[in-house]
């Protein structure tokens, strides 16, 4: 199943498709709001088990969030078993220290379960790490590294086994191989390799399948889903 969502001013719903783009339904995220949803991720729950989807409201083009973002966790369920809505959604409130940042990319590490947020700036991309839960007050994320890619990061993913990290820009895809025992921070300190990027108007999403092929899609109505086979 390929899961997707709309951009700002969209409803708090997720859309399910099969890999060929056929519609599998629209499903509400209960209790959620959508100011500027920008990315989502698949990964385990906070204890490292189960299968969850994470959708992030973190876009901040006008610097009004003061670093506060929201992520909703829902169970990763076969859409044929859903009746118009996910059974539950867990809110996660997080802050990025140091003020407002525009960000459009997240992933969830399946090896050391944590949420990663990458900011969107042509000059530098800040990578923040945070928990998969929050309490009465928002949890503060921690800056782990800074990337200099000479392009804006508009999407991210990590493979299901945690061994490959992918970031994408509007017209670029960067990848890092993660050695066994290495942290995300150490992995991202190495130079990335450039991977094929489909010719899309405004590429804003990337997602691995279980075989490390990856899907991409552009922002905009009726955008085609591209599948890039593993090289």
Image (cartoon, rainbow, N blue to C red):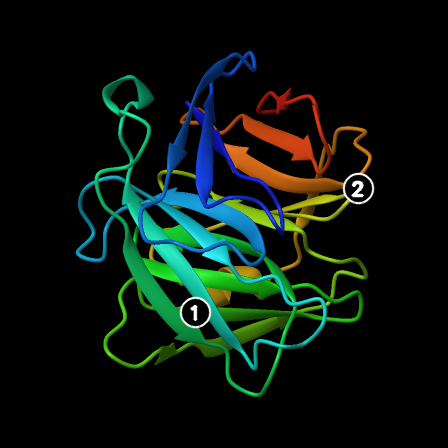
With 212 as the anchor, is 82 left or right in this view?
left
Q: Nearer the viewer, residue 102 or 124?
A: 102
Q: In x, y percent, where is residue 58? A: 54, 62
Q: In x, y percent, where is residue 11? A: 51, 44
Q: Say which quadrant the C terminus sits in.
A: top right
Q: Say which quadrant the N terminus sits in.
A: top left
Q: Nearer the viewer, residue 62 or 211?
A: 62
Q: Residues within 10 Å of mark 2 (few under 14, many from 20)?
A: some
Number of callouts in the render? 2
> Going 53% across and 25% down the picture, which residue do you hit?
213
> Going 31% across and 34% down the picture, which residue do you hit?
85
Q: In x, y percent, where is residue 196? A: 72, 32
SS at badge 1: strand
- The answer to whether one can see residue 77 in this image is yes
> Going 40% across and 73% down the picture, which residue do you hit?
94
Q: Identify residue for label 1.
A: 129
Is there CB contact under 8 Å for labels 2 and 1?
A: no
Task: Measure how far apart labels 2 and 1 are at the Cα level.
Answer: 25 Å
Q: In x, y percent, where is residue 35? A: 55, 59
Q: Which is more N-terminal, label 1 or label 2? A: 1
Q: Identify residue for label 2.
A: 171
With 133 as the anchor, is 27 left or right in this view?
right
In this rendering, the answer to whether 52 lies above or below 154 is above
SS at badge 2: loop
Q: Residues within 10 Å of mark 1 (few under 14, many from 20)?
A: many
Q: Quadrant of residue 211?
A: top left
Label of residue 56 in the image: none
- The answer to whether one can see residue 163 in this image is no
User: Outermost residue, bottom direction?
Assistant: 98
């Amino acid at each position: 199943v390929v899961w997707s969502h709309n951009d700002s001013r969209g409803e708090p719903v997720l859309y399910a498709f099969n890999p060929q783009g056929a519609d599998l339904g629209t499903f509400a995220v209960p209790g959620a709001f959508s100011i500027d949803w920008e990315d989502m991720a698949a990964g385990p729950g906070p204890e490292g088990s189960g299968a969850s989807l994470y959708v992030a409201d973190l876009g901040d083009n006008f610097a009004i969030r003061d670093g506060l973002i929201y992520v909703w966790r829902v169970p990763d369920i076969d859409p044929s078993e859903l009746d118009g809505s996910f059974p539950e959604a867990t809110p996660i409130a997080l802050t990025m220290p140091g003020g407002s940042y525009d960000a459009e990319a997240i992933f969830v590490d399946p090896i050391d379960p944590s949420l990663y947020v990458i900011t969107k700036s042509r000059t530098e991309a800040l990578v923040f790490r945070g928990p998969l839960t929050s309490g009465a007050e928002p949890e503060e994320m921690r800056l782990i590294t800074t990337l200099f890619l000479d392009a804006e990061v508009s999407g991210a993913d990590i493979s299901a086994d945690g061994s490959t990290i992918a970031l994408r820009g509007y017209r670029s895809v960067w990848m890092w191989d993660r050695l066994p025992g290495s942290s995300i921070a150490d992995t991202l300190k190495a130079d990335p390799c450039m991977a094929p990027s489909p010719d899309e108007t405004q590429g804003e999403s990337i997602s691995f399948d279980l075989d490390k092929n990856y899907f991409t899609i552009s922002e905009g109505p009726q955008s085609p889903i591209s599948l890039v086979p593993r090289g």
